[in-house]
Amino acid sequence: MADLLKAETVAEFRAKGATVLRAVFDDWMEVLRAGVDYNLEHPAPNARDYRTEEGGRFLSDYCNWDRIPQYRDFIENSTAAQIGSELMGSRTVRLFHEHVIVKTPKTGMPTPWHQDLPYYCLDATQTVSLWIPMDAVPRERTLEFVAGSHLWGKYFRPQRFDGTALNENDGLEALPDIDGDRDAYDIIGWALEPGDAVAFDYRTVHGAPANNSATAQRRAFSLRLVGDDATFARREGIKTSPPFEGVTLAHGAPLEGPEFPLLL
């Protein structure tokens, strides 16, 4: 099978922990928008659904691929798995979960700086999230990354979207004040069009500004993929997100089972 990505794109992903992929999912926008629209009307019981005083809505929902057919169609039939394989350098690609975040107009709530991996019941070095916007995203409202932070060798304390700690005494280091000293970091991000995607490592520090626009919404579908070395992690006394409460895998077992289907 011919490679889909240029060598320099793969190199940027591995060196900086994030890269942009232009127009890779143009043909899937109608399908994904239909799935996200259904998700907005039918959020899962554990969804985070915030409403602001200005009338905005911030929905964060995940693990709906088995009940929303458009999500399953994209996951199983798009080029996402092959793209993930090339970026991770992995022979196999497995679904960890999908995640939808919608910021409607006047959603004055930023996504705080964080890493994804410390939230997860997962240990892995071969990881990639594909963040796919349904709407045009200008640079000032786009997802931002601290380039190279996936190579710092640190896990930072997970936070809820309201900024409170997910686990108060998890023993992890607090994130530095990135916004208080932005010039000290190599912060990267891209203006995006529907059909583009941003790919990033689960260890890369990232965040997003509030959507203070009076008219523009920002709908995004994220696909979390893992490679050959992914194992299940039991973190006793620690909340993980998603919780995957029904998974019975032992700590250190290969990540497999119906919740985590093999895609490639």
Image: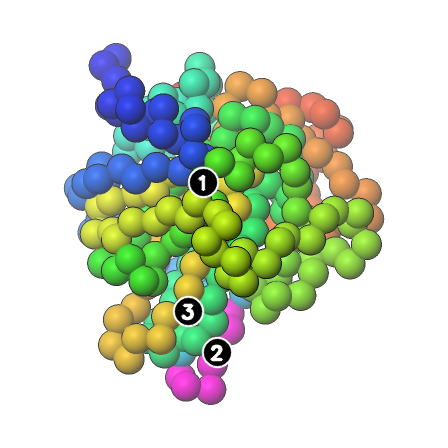
* Mark 3 or 2: the one toward you: 3
Q: How many marks?
A: 3
Give the distance between the C-alpha atoms of the residues marked 3 and 2, in whole angstroms: 13 Å
Give the distance between the C-alpha atoms of the residues marked 2 and 1, in whole angstroms: 32 Å
- Label 1 sits on residue: 147
- Label 3 sits on residue: 210
Quarter of the figure with the N terminus:
top left
Q: Residue at x 60, y 28 (%)?
A: 124
* Amino acid tagged 2: Arg
Q: Few, some or many C-alpha atoms within 10 Å of disc 1 (few <14, some 14-19, many ≥20)?
A: many
- Label 2 sits on residue: 51
Q: Few, some or many C-alpha atoms within 10 Å of disc 2 (few <14, some 14-19, many ≥20)?
A: some
Q: Is residue 46 left or right of residue 166?
A: left
Instruction: State which region is magenta.
Output: 49-55
* Residue occupying the far front of the picture: 183
Q: Residue at x 47, y 66 (%)?
A: 110
The answer to whether residue 105 shows anywhere in this view is yes
* Marks 3 and 2, the one that precedes in the sequence: 2
* Amino acid tagged 1: Ala
